[in-house]
Image (cartoon, rainbow, N blue to C red):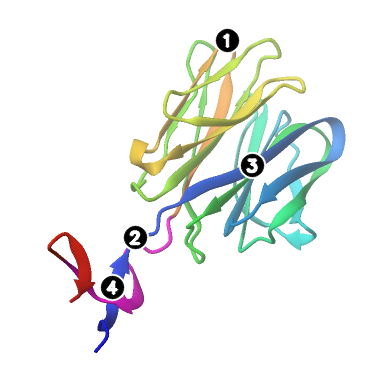
Amino acid sequence: SGPRSRWRRSNVAVAYEADGDNQIFALSSMTISVVTTAADYLAVKTAMTDSTLSVSTVTHNLDTVSFVNATESASPDIRIELWERVAPDLGTLDVVITYSGSAVAVGGAVGFTGVHQTTPSADFTAATGASGTNPSVTVPNVTADDYVLDCVQADNATTTLTVGANQTQLWNRDPFKPCAGSVQDGADGGAMTWTIGTGAWRMAGVRIVAAAAGAATWGPLMALKNNRLVAA
């Protein structure tokens, strides 16, 4: 008879697939092109240099993208928002962000695979700092199968932002004041850091949650015998 079939366990880890970004100066909408081939989750982050503004709507290929969380401060005058969509359409498609007014803003759209489809993001964490301190946030509860996504906005038109050692920079734009974003593999933890030249800053990070670790799948039960896989 053939190999027996039983429920077995397999870990599903998040992987970063693709991103796109853009910037606007004194406009009320932004279009970001992003290419995805396998992403099951799309995160959209945007930072504005005016905390009285906010995002009105976000769409991806005309589909609704949902608001997750936001952080803002009057000093420094910054607002950062996170939006998301599970099971996004695949291809070379546009994300359109509409703001509540004329904005100076930077936005990034990031595709991931292996993401939990019911609770795709968690532990949104924000921090702000005065000039002379470097931007950092530590997102809690990060496991090795998760990913971390961040966004940092500087409050100085002439400064620079340099990404931390374990992070992959996704964007670093300067329509008026620098804004940057990055991702980090959960195996490197939840601490996200940047080096800033000078000036105050605001930053937000979030945990991208892996599909249920140890999800049950049906398949043949195998064993290793004499260095070969055989039916158990």
Closer to the camera, 141 or 201? 141
Name the residue that disc number 3 marks: 19
Which amino acid, by three-letter code, is at mark 2?
Asn
Question: Of label 2 and label 1, which has the lower sequence position?
Answer: 2
Question: Of label 4 and label 1, which has the lower sequence position?
Answer: 4
Query: What stretch of residues is rendered in magenta?
Result: 210-224
What element does badge 2 sit on? loop
Kindly report the distance in space between the C-alpha atoms of the residues bearing marks 4 and 3.
Answer: 33 Å
Question: In which quadrant is the C terminus drawn?
Answer: bottom left
The residue located at (77%, 23%) in the rendering is 175
Which amino acid, by three-letter code, is at mark 1?
Thr
Q: Categorize mark 4 by other alpha carbons within 10 Å: few (<14), some (14-19), many (20+).
A: few
What element does badge 1 sit on? loop
Which amino acid, by three-letter code, is at mark 4?
Arg
Kindly report the distance in space between the C-alpha atoms of the residues bearing marks 2 and 3.
Answer: 25 Å
The residue located at (86%, 40%) in the rendering is 28
Task: Tell me where residue 100 appears, x and y as whole percent.
Answer: 81, 44
Closer to the camera, 34 or 140? 34
Type of secondary structure dominating the magenta stretch? strand
User: Does the residue at mark 4 contact the one at mark 1 (Cβ under 8 Å)?
Assistant: no
